[in-house]
Amino acid sequence: MTRLLNEKMQFWGYRRQDGRVGVRNHVLILPTITCATQTAQRVTELVSGTVTFIHQHGCAQVGTDYDQTARTYAGMGMNPNVYGVIVLGLGCETHQAHRIGDEIAKCGKPVETVSIQDHGGTLQTIAEVAKIAVKMVQDASMIQRELCDFSELIVGTECGGSDACSGLSANPAVGRTSDLVVQQGGTAILAETTELIGAEHLIANRAANDQVAKKAYAVIKMMENRSIQMGVDIRTGNPSPGNIEGGLSSLEEKSLGAATKSGTTRLEEVIDYAQVPTKKGLVWMDTPGHDIEQLTGMVAGGAQIVLFTSGRGTPTGSPIAPVIKISTNTPMFERMNENMDLNAGTIVDGTETVDEVGRRIMDEIQHVSNGKLTKAEILKQHDFGIWRIGPTF
Amino acid sequence: MSEYKTLYLSKEDSVAVALSEIPEKTSVVVKVGQDDLAVTVTILEPIRFGHKFAVKAIEHGADIIKYGEVIGAASAFIPAGAHVHVHNLEGKRGRGDKIAE
């Protein structure tokens, strides 16, 4: 399939009150505290069209760590893939459900807040949340998709379970896709600051201005300093044992491969974890290399779709954003086919070019935006993890 | 000469990547692009898919180059054709363990 380079691409999406466009139409049961996650889970078993996630956060958190967790919860609720939200709290936690609910409601979507302690326990709360959810799901089902431009998309990119092929096949192909998304007027997020250590100069050289370049070096320094303060070799955690088995010898080597996901366009800004980009184009979100934590940060930052390359293979998905998983090598694509959506191993095999695979990924973004389900969605892989930056008290 | 596939990314690189299992004592030819001079390397030990071998001798302490960039330093003398990995390559970044008290 050939497409002219400058041809405008569109998809059928759900336009929200705040003008943003979703590619999915979920009702999210959002537990702000770990104590409410089981109750939320029960509701999703009862009511079709609802999603939730399990986590261990939301209480005894303070300062910037409190803020980052609150921003992540609110961002999940505000993501345009979500039609409406039922925020579920226990009642006594630091991350009060009504505060998160008020924040989400600012974007104009339906939000209800329920507390387990106010409803006299688990069973009454399940009944109450389920009743609200039934109505919300039916309302959501009345929303029609409309034709939208690719410029409305925020596409997250990440790599996990990397091998020596990652930097040769899938990551450069995603870099090509990133360029095409930017060319369409959309936004591509580069994440995993840890995995840019040793390659930061290559990205910072593409910064829109000195301030952006300075922030790029600053987030790298902060991340590297964390390992230095701990007195450890970062290689004990990253590259991981699987990366090393796959042939990657150092963090710098992994980073140089990971950085190719960013393509060739100008770096417009460096944003905080779970922050919504303020600019279109290529944006760097400061996240750790941990697969689920960076995925959650990008989705909370408004990414409707995430591209995830893997050499070792991974089941990862998000409760609200489709994750397109791209294999770096053909043997793994065949071995873990129920988890992997696309194969970039063809580049190593010599049967396809980086450019061709980049375009194939772009076509897949269009299909998935229109409603095609990813493997992770079909397997209900609803992963969620917050990058915690302070201790629990 | 063998048919083993390898990837040699940049002229400055001191390592190349095996794109198939290469047995020891095999001679492989690595080259960058179409026109550049090809280098013949005799592989000293089996190299697994995705792993690296030295295309030239690397002195102890010297930078190891891949993608035309530094990926670490040699923690021992590495002869041409040897497997290059965590046993003889040390990363230089994020090394809290190297900071003196």
Image (spheres, rainbow, N blue to C red):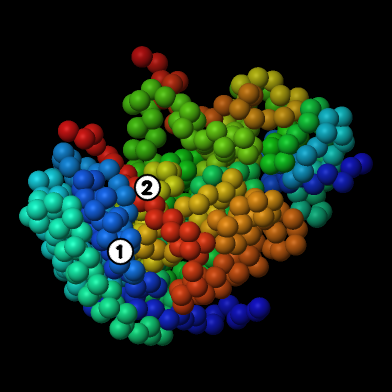
> What amino acid is labelled 2 in the image?
Glu
Residue A111 numbered tag: none
Please report the residue visible at 45 percent of the width from the left and 62 percent of the height from the top. A377
Closer-to-camera residue (A20/A4): A20
Name the N-terminal-most of marks 1 and 2. Answer: 1
Chain letter, disc 2 residue: A
Residue A46 numbered tag: 1
Vertical placement of residue A104 versus A25, above or below: above
Give the x, y percent position of residue A4. Answer: 60, 81
Q: Residue tagged by mark 2? A: A293
Most distant residue in the top direction: B101
Question: Do we see residue A292 in this rendering?
Answer: yes
Vertical placement of residue A38 versus A114, above or below: above
Please report the residue visible at 19 percent of the width from the left and 62 percent of the height from the top. A127
Q: Quadrant of residue A249?
A: top right
Chain letter, disc 1 residue: A
Label 1 crowding class (10 Å Cα cut-off): few <14, some 14-19, many 20+?
some
Quadrant including the C terminus of chain B: top left
Please report the residue visible at 55 percent of the width from the left and 56 percent of the height from the top. A339
Closer-to-camera residue (A312/A238): A312
Closer-to-camera residue (B48/A319): A319
> What amino acid is labelled 1 in the image?
Leu
Give the x, y percent position of residue B66. Answer: 64, 40
Quadrant including the N terminus of chain B: top right
Vertical placement of residue B70 versus A285, above or below: above
Please report the residue visible at 73 percent of the width from the left and 32 percent of the height from the top. B54
Contact between labelled residues 2 and 1, with CB atoms less than 8 Å apart:
no
Question: Do we see residue A167 in this rendering?
Answer: no
Q: Quick check: A66 left or right of A331?
A: left
Vertical placement of residue A308 versus B53, above or below: below
Q: Secondary structure at mark 2?
A: helix
